Image (cartoon, helix red, strand yellow):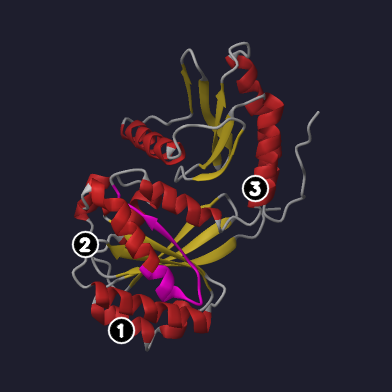
Amino acid sequence: MPNTAMKKKVLLMGKSGSGKTSMRSIIFANYIARDTRRLGATIDVEHSHVRFLGNLVLNLWDCGGQDTFMENYFTSQRDNIFRNVEVLIYVFDVESRELEKDMHYYQSCLEAILQNAPDAKIFCLVHKMDLVQEDQRDLIFKEREEDLRRLSRPLECACFRTSIWDETLYKAWSSIVYQLIPNVQQLEMNLRNFAQIIEADEVLLFERATFLVISHYQCKEQRDVHRFEKISNIIKQFKLSCSKLAASFQSMEVRNSNFAAFIDIFTSNTYVMVVMSDPSIPSAATLINIRNARKHFEKLERVDGPKHSLLMR
């Protein structure tokens, strides 16, 4: 029997031109950054249903940011827009010349959320950070983050700096989606057990369509704290290149004198990446271990399925 889909309402809001539709298209519609230039402005609200991890469906409301639409969201459409919201993602153009108006609209959103969906999770994306001089980015983001957290009280918001031209977009959206996965703690526990059983340095789980990182476990400290998002970005671009040649990406092995990394289809909704540094473990053994774990992780993806655990032996 197929499981019932679990729908989560996600609002994507922000002033017109802030980059909402571009980021949505890159993450969920397989656009590359340069192709987003041909996207037009969003008129009113665009609805899309994104199936994620099989049973989880993101009911994404991309809300046009022109002043007329924004005013309507807070008046005549208020209940319809803000009722049953699980996540509000508010996008700010870091170079906006109307910062005061941006903050006013954001506060209006918060008031509507507080009234209609007080338990909603709130994320603020300070976007187009690539337009800021590199030596100024940390300072500008920190100032903006402090302002947004102060304005958001009594609600809490998580802030991310983003750009469609680098891995920061994947970091933000991975963090957002992570909050929506219903059995994520159980998934992480089983991923840890899997990593320890096969003696891996690190194991990452990617959602199959978006290549967002949804879970990971590491046994050893790694130097690059941005490696997950970089891998997401690189493999997503490679997958798109394969599809343009009418080929499908299935697996990859990267090896040097220090480590071997395996990326392979894992379940019907995920890819897995396994990093090994023990040269005595042959590739075939790791690939067999990945194959043997698939069935177990397929069960975990079913939200209301039985709660099994991958036990150490």
Q: Is residue 16 visible?
A: yes
Residue type (three-letter) at the residue carrying disc 2:
Glu
Q: What residue is shown with label 1?
A: 71
Q: What residue is shown with label 3?
A: 301
Q: Position of residue 279 (x, y in %)?
A: 58, 12
The image quarter in which residue 181 lies: bottom right
User: Would you place residue 9 above or below residue 38 in this image?
Assistant: below
Measured Cα–Cα span from mark 2 to mark 1:
22 Å
Task: Kindly identify the residue that appears in the image at 51 percent across and 77 percent down.
Answer: 154
Measured Cα–Cα span from mark 3 to mark 2:
41 Å
Number of the label disc, if any, that sits on residue 158: none
Q: What residue is shown with label 2?
A: 95
Residue type (three-letter) at the residue carrying disc 1:
Glu
The residue range painted magenta reads 147-164
Q: Nearer the viewer, residue 247 or 24?
A: 24
Question: Mark 3 and mark 1 in contact (Cβ < 8 Å)?
Answer: no
Question: Mark 1 and mark 2 in contact (Cβ < 8 Å)?
Answer: no
Q: Position of residue 310 (x, y in %)?
A: 75, 37
